[in-house]
Amino acid sequence: MGEAYIVGAVRTAGGRRNGKLKDWHPIDLGALVLDELVARTTADPGAIEDVIFGCVDQVGAQAANIARNAVLSSSLPESVPGTTVDRQCGSSQQAIHFAAQAVMSGVHDVVIAGGVEAMSQVPLGGNAIAGYKAGMGSPYGKGMKRRYPGVKFNQFAGAEMMAEKWGFSREVLDAYGLSSHERAAAATREGRFEREILPVEVALEGGATEKFKADEGIRYDASLEAMGALKTLSEKGLLTAGTSSQITDGAAAVMIANEAGLQRIGATPRAAIRAMTVVGDDPVMMLAAPIPATRKLLERSGIAIGDVDRYEVNEAFASVPMAWLHELEADSEKLNVNGGAIALGHPLGCTGAKLMTTLLHELERTDGRYGIQTMCEGGGLSNATLIERL
């Protein structure tokens, strides 16, 4: 089996809902990161053999195979194909896995994986909402209802189940949420994200424009007092908006190649993908799958958790990385060191490629060797990826 190398990775800053990126069409936002990735790697655009994008709510502006449409909106030649993946929140991490599998098998030599989500334009659950309005019914069929009688599959309920199962108090969850903002604020002030972020021109009131280049959701003045004053998402719950990921607009892309691909585009690899896995877990609790996914990843790779330098575990809700940290007996000082989705946002189908971009740059910044990325996904799924910086 061949190798899969990461040649380059880039992302936009995360735009808050109805914020700086609200007027960017998701196809054009996807095209923007494609063009930037090609420019940064100096790869021949014609050498790219496929573009695989993650996108969760594939309806409206994000319908009709957004990956192909992003290619057609970019400077890439028409000969470059594209396809769109939905593995819920892990969509673009799965896109990275598919790209890696393609180059490892030798079917392709150079593939771009990425993702885009414009949540200001296409709301969370937009595809299901559109289906209901069109009279197309529920996405859950009779077989699922027989297997899980009376269950309403709900990520918010799953996050509360995790908080209860692992015994996390409101105060502990709030403290984690605060740390996400503090870490993200420190990383931004120190310029840690500058190399990975593509500045995007956005319109201002009055016709002026500016370069949007810093994640918009960070609360620089966050405090425990302010966190504690927030209402819980459910009447008897523990989680709040301050301990949940933010609705966000964004795009990211990662170029992946094998040895032949490196030669074709004249590139030096920055990291190698050493192991990949995806698992299914309890779809009712839904969000705990990163735990077995990481265990399986470590088992397959032969790497111990303590030998890994950085962990990116998506902060869908504070209870998710906290439970992962406890079960894996991992070092909290290596986890989401630049903040996570609570502060930086979670643009759904973009997030997997976004986290990989941050993980790669963080390993380079700190001279680290191994990094793990994992995230919870709708339906009780999780992808996990181990990379080695070269």
Image (cartoon, grey):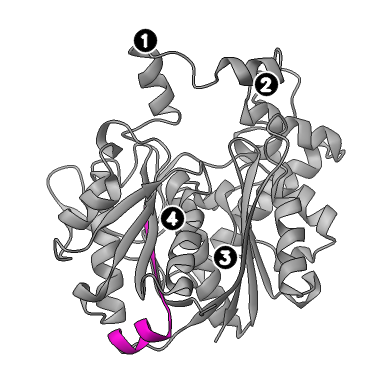
User: Looking at the image, which residue is at 47% across and 62% down?
Assistant: 96
Q: Which residue is mark 4?
A: 215
The kind of secondary structure element at disc 4 is loop
The kind of secondary structure element at disc 3 is helix
Where residue 158 appears, as percent x and y from the top left, is: 70, 31
The kind of secondary structure element at disc 2 is loop
State which quadrant residue 50 falls in.
Answer: bottom left
Type of the residue with mark 2: Ser
Type of the residue with mark 4: Asp
Looking at the image, tell me whether mark 2 or mark 3 is earlier in sequence order.
Answer: 3
Type of the residue with mark 3: Ala
Where residue 200 appears, as percent x and y from the top left, is: 27, 59
| Nearer-the-camera pick, 380 or 60 | 380
Q: Is residue 13 left or right of residue 20?
A: right
Q: Which residue is mark 3?
A: 186
Looking at the image, tell me whether mark 3 or mark 4 is earlier in sequence order.
Answer: 3
